[in-house]
Structures are given as C-alpha cells and as structure tokens.
Amino acid sequence: MSLLTDLINLDLSDSTEKIIAEYIWVGGSGMDMRSKARTLPGPVTDPSELPKWNYDGSSTGQAPGEDSEVILYPQAIFKDPFRRGNNILVMCDAYTPAGEPIPTNKRHAAAEIFSNPDVVAEVPWYGIEQEYTLLQKDVNWPVGWPIGGFPGPQGPYYCSIGADKSFGRDIVDSHYKACLYAGINISGINGEVMPGQWEFQVGPSVGISAADEIWIARYILERITEIAGVVVSFDPKPIPGDWNGAGAHTNYSTKSMREEGGFEIIKKAIDKLGLRHKEHISAYGEGNERRLTGHHETADINTFKWGVANRGASIRVGRDTEKEGKGYFEDRRPASNMDPYIVTSMIAETTLLWNP
Amino acid sequence: MSLLSDLVNLSLSDSTEKIIAEYIWIGGSGMDIRSKARTLPGPVSDPSKLPKWNYDGSSTGQAAGDDSEVILYPQAIFRDPFRRGNNILVMCDAYTPAGDPIPTNKRHNAAKIFSHPNVASEEPWYGIEQEYTLMQKDVNWPIGWPVGGFPGPQGPYYCGVGADKAIGRDIVDAHYKACIYAGIGISGVNGEVMPGQWEFQVGPVEGISAGDQVWVARYLLERITEISGVMVSFDPKPVPGDWNGAGAHCNYSTKTMRNDGGLAVIKKAIEKLQLKHKEHIAAYGEGNERRLTGKHETADINTFSWGVANRGASVRVGRDTEKEGKGYFEDRRPASNMDPYVVTSMIAETTILG
C-alpha cells in the first residue's frame, strides 16, 4: 500500500494554507470516543478562535431523532500526530442548542469546580497513571495469550522485555511519541504486571487540563490500536482470577501540600477523602468492585486506608513525601475506565471545598 | 502497519526539547532485565544529572507489598537505538529507601572493588565473549532446529553461511549496529559451534563499565529478539548431549600485564585464581556443571588447568601473549548466565587484592 501511505503522509503546506481539525467528544456511554474532521482556512492555536460545531446526537445515544443536533464547544487544541503539518485535534464538550451541557457532559461541572477561586488559588496538580489491556481482535482475549489457554503466572511481566514476556510494545512506543508530538504532558510508560497490560502516565497537569489530556491520550491510543488491528480495553478487571486489574491511580497535590508543612495538609486531605469514601467510590468507574478486592495491589472496595509506600492501601503516600514533609499523594481507587473530569474535580472539591 | 512505524520513528526534535529516558535494572532472579521510561525536560549526557527513580519491587520479587518502593540510581547512559534522537537508555542499580543496596544489587560491591586504589591504578581491562542461543517461541527449541527432531551434528555451523547453517543473522547484525549506535564497546560477532547459537564480544572496557556494557548489550539483544518474535536463552547448556554449551569467557589484563615483563605477572595471577577455583566457580553462573564437563572445549568443573592456546583449559593464554612476554589471558570458566559485575570484580579482587 505504498501509494496509500504516500497520500496519508502528504505534506499539504506547499499546496495550501488550509488545515484539518479533528473534533473529538465523549459519546453516550461516557467511555466511547467519537470524532469527525473539518477543513479550516488556516492554522489555529487558540481554542476560542475555533468555530463551534454540531453532530448527530441520535447516533450516539445523546439526543432523540427529531431533535438530534448536539453542539460541540472546542476546549483544547493538540497537534495531530497522524496528519501532522498544521493539522490539529480539538477536545470538545457537548451542549444542547439552548446552551445547556447534555447529561453525559462531565467536563462542564468539572470546569466550574476548577474555576472556583479557592481551587484556583491552590493550583491543583494531577498525575494520572492510565492502565489498559490490549486484546486480540475478534476473540476478546489479551494479546500474547494463547487462545483457549493462559500464559504462565504473573511475575515475569512487569517492566519486562522479550517476546515471551512483553506483548504490544510497538503500540506503546508509538503512543508515547505521538502524545509528546501532540503536546500532551505524557511523563512515562511501563509494562504492567499482567501480560498484555500497559500503563502510561500524564502529568503533572493543572486543573481541567489533566482530564483533557487523558481523554486525548486515550483517543490517540485507540487510533493507534485501530491501525495495529488490536483492541484496547479499559475494563478494570478484564480477566477474573489471579490476574491484576487495571486502574487509573490519580496522584494529587495542591500548592500548600507542595510547600513547607505540606505533609500535615496532605493528612487532613486524606482524612476528608476517608469521610467521603462511598461517594468517591461510586464515581470512580463501573465494575470497580471486581477489581478492588484487597488482593493484587488493591485495597478492598469497602475499606478506606492509607499508608506510606503501601500498594495495598486506598491511598499511598510516597517515601519522598514523608521524608521531605511535603509533596503529593496517590489515590489508588479509580478504575481504568474512570472519567478523569469527574475524578479530578471530585478530589479537588472534597479536599478544598467540602467540610464534614 | 507503515503508519505505526511512522509514529514509532517520529523525530520529536522539531516539536519539543523533551527526551525519553528508559531506566533499566536487574530484577529479582538476577538475570531478568526490567525497564520503564520517563520524559525528561531536555537532553542529558551525565548520569549524575539524571534524577533517581523508583519502582514496585513487590512485582519483581525485590520488596514486600506494604513497603514496595525500590530506588533506582542512574549509573551509565547510552543512546537509545530504538527511539534515537536525543533519547537515552540508563543502566541503574537498586537501593532501599534508606540507601542500602538491595541483595540482588551486585554492582554496588563491584564498584567498591573497582574504586580501591590498588585496583584503579592497575586499569583492569575486560573483553567478555557473550554466547547465547536463539530459541523458537512457544516450543523452547533452538531456531532452525526441526520441531521434534535435531539438525545434523556440529561441524558446519561455526561462522557458517547459508540458510541451512546460519539462522538468525538478522537479529545478530541488528544487535551489532544497535550496540555501536548506543555507545557500547562491541568488538565483534560470530556464529557459534551449535546451530542457533551466536556470540558477541564487548571490550576491551575498563573496570565497572564492562559490567554495565554487557548488561545493556543483553538488554538490546532481548529487545531485538522481542521484535523478531524469537527468544534468547542464556542457559549454559540449552540442549543436553553432544551439543556445545554457552559461556561468557572473560579476557582480562592489568597495566602491569600489558607492559614488558607482563607474562610473569600473568602467571602469578593465574596461580592466585587456581587457589580460589571453588569460590570463583560458585559465582560463575547457575547450572555451569552441565556445561563444564571437560568436553566441548571446556575444562571439567572440578579441575583448574591453564595452557597456551588450550581451549580445553580453565584459563587460556594466547600465543601472542606468550611470544611478546606480555598481554592478557582468558578465563573460560564463566557461564553465559554469569553476572558480569560479579565476575569482573572477583577476578580483579583475587588477582590484585588477594
């Protein structure tokens, strides 16, 4: 297909000023991503200069057929690693024609929390560790696993190398560079404990941009697995039994936590989270009860506990933070299929705006 | 999948100053290599300027779940032949949060030996001949061997050419160039006596770098076999019977051995090694007794012998060294799965400090 690749990779900058903008939004299930593209007359770097658009909400479970237009508001721009040149990806959220956020639009409420002056003043940082599993197409079984059977038990796979231990690295490595190219603050990757499972981290990012970046990183990942002919799963426990689940641990700090005396602030914040454990858990992803069992480096879903360097706790504080008396902490409860708009804003709300 | 390779090969230098650093360490078995990557704000060429990092030791058999952080100290930088650009590979060793080397960290003790003034002043050089066997995935049988059967007996394969004699050369040649690109002192490759078995040599490299470079060369090899869908085995006797084993012969010299009168110094050093034969053998790799039988160009594991040009000896001195009265010698005892930090530092310790 060399002629097709020539065309896909065509550099348009010698022929035209026009650019292509891929508008991306979250569909009716809250996890399905949708996108479509349009031509714009020239390069754009500021989302407020992009036109609003609309889509057929009746085809995504987000509007009835007789009143199907859902309006897309551009919120963040990233460079398009597939089309390159001046072409862009645009993260959007969805509104009714009357200007109301539709029910599945979780960004709107998050943006309100992040514009609250008490939250703004604390400059909340997020580092999100997105785990995911690569599945073979058509059989719904992880890549590298024998059909009808299982690989050897967990142990050799975490951060591993070798054809018998590491499956899908080309997807992971192309995703890493594509995200860096796009302008996403991707801070690292690693092979996970279950074979065929991987993780990337985004952060530290401030406020609402953390979630925008996670959604775009997920979009780029699924575009890449589409090329590779493989399926990406964000299910929190893709294989039942003695196999690790997939999470989206959320590392968090505020200005006060990062400064002298921050460790006390951290402990107070953790206490507040402990008092709202049930509320957070119910918003931390569907099916999380299959994952948070107390085994496989998780804390039981009904238990809230925290500890230093303890990977079996709900919240883990790093040794560095303990030693220096300031830093950040890790909420290990969110599932891989969590909505980052909900999780990031809820942590900010509980720790900065809520009082028992 | 040409679009995927476009992305994997994307040059980021036009979009960002950021670089990707792949931190590499040795896992709980002492032979499993692990790695993960992080983004850094700009290019780095000095390991002391790289941040320490940490990993989940409970997932590699190196820490408990409730106290799982193991700290990575960057020790050596190499260029990343897979990501290229300004991206790097970082060889690390592992410590507890309190700053003590964890039990599987063999580099720390080796570094102490190599910084001893008597050792440092002797500028110990190492040339390590790493043998390995390529195995078919899923059946654990050497590549090119018929499944359920055997190839013809050894003879045609050493340095052989041809589809019926040399199997896996693309892996070997890719590895050779990748190592040179990375900055490893790889000095050569050859096909070995057993079909599907190969060798590369790293050296001469001085002191602790020999260990660092062999480990990163092994890492590059297993990354390349991963791409090829083939497995690499460092087992010292992968196929029992009339088939060669795999070793990691260690060539060694000090400043005084390389100067006039060196041959006498070499002979003294060999005598010291003879006196500690059992201790060395115990540290020269698991399963070596299946390989050191006295046949297949090895010396029996319980016997220490040395000779000029003798491949059936424990230690071999080359004819050139004998003729010029100075040079180096070859310790043929280490197995392919030896830890180069242990072997190189032990040879230095026994011959210089003993």
Image: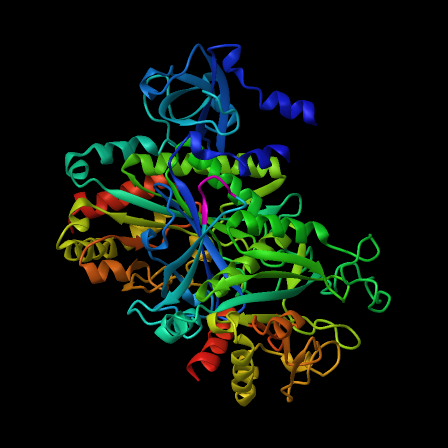
Residue found at x 23% / y 42%: A124
x and y percentages locating residue A140 in the rendered image: 62, 48
Q: Main secondary structure of the magenta part?
A: loop
> Which of A144/A97 is in front?
A144
In this orientation, does residue A30 appear? no
Asked if B201 appears above or below B112 in the picture, the reply is above
Q: In the displayed structure, would residue A41 be above or below residue B246?
A: above
Give residue A206's position: percent from left, percent from top.
Answer: 27, 38
Please state the horizontal and vertical placement of residue B154, each as a whole percent of the image: 82, 68
Tell me the quadrant of the picture where the N terminus of chain A can be found. top right
Viewer-nearest residue: A83 or A149 = A83
Task: Identify the magenta region.
Answer: B83-88
Q: Is residue A259 above or below residue B300?
A: above
Return the residue found at the far right.
Answer: B152
Residue that extends furthest to the left in the rendered view of this protein: A261
Q: How many marks?
A: 0
* Vertical placement of residue A205 versus B176, above or below: above
Which quadrant of the view contains residue B97? bottom left
- Name the residue: 47% across, 66% down: B60
Q: Is residue A72 visible?
A: yes
Whether the magenta-drawn stretch holds residue B86 is answered as yes
Question: Which residue is rendered at x = 43% and y = 69% of the image?
Answer: B107
Q: Is residue A320 left or right of residue A40?
A: left
The reply to whether the magenta stretch includes residue A75 is no
Quarter of the rendering containing residue B266: bottom right
In x, y percent, where is residue A257? 18, 50
**Residue in the foreground of this view, choosing between B34 and B65:** B34
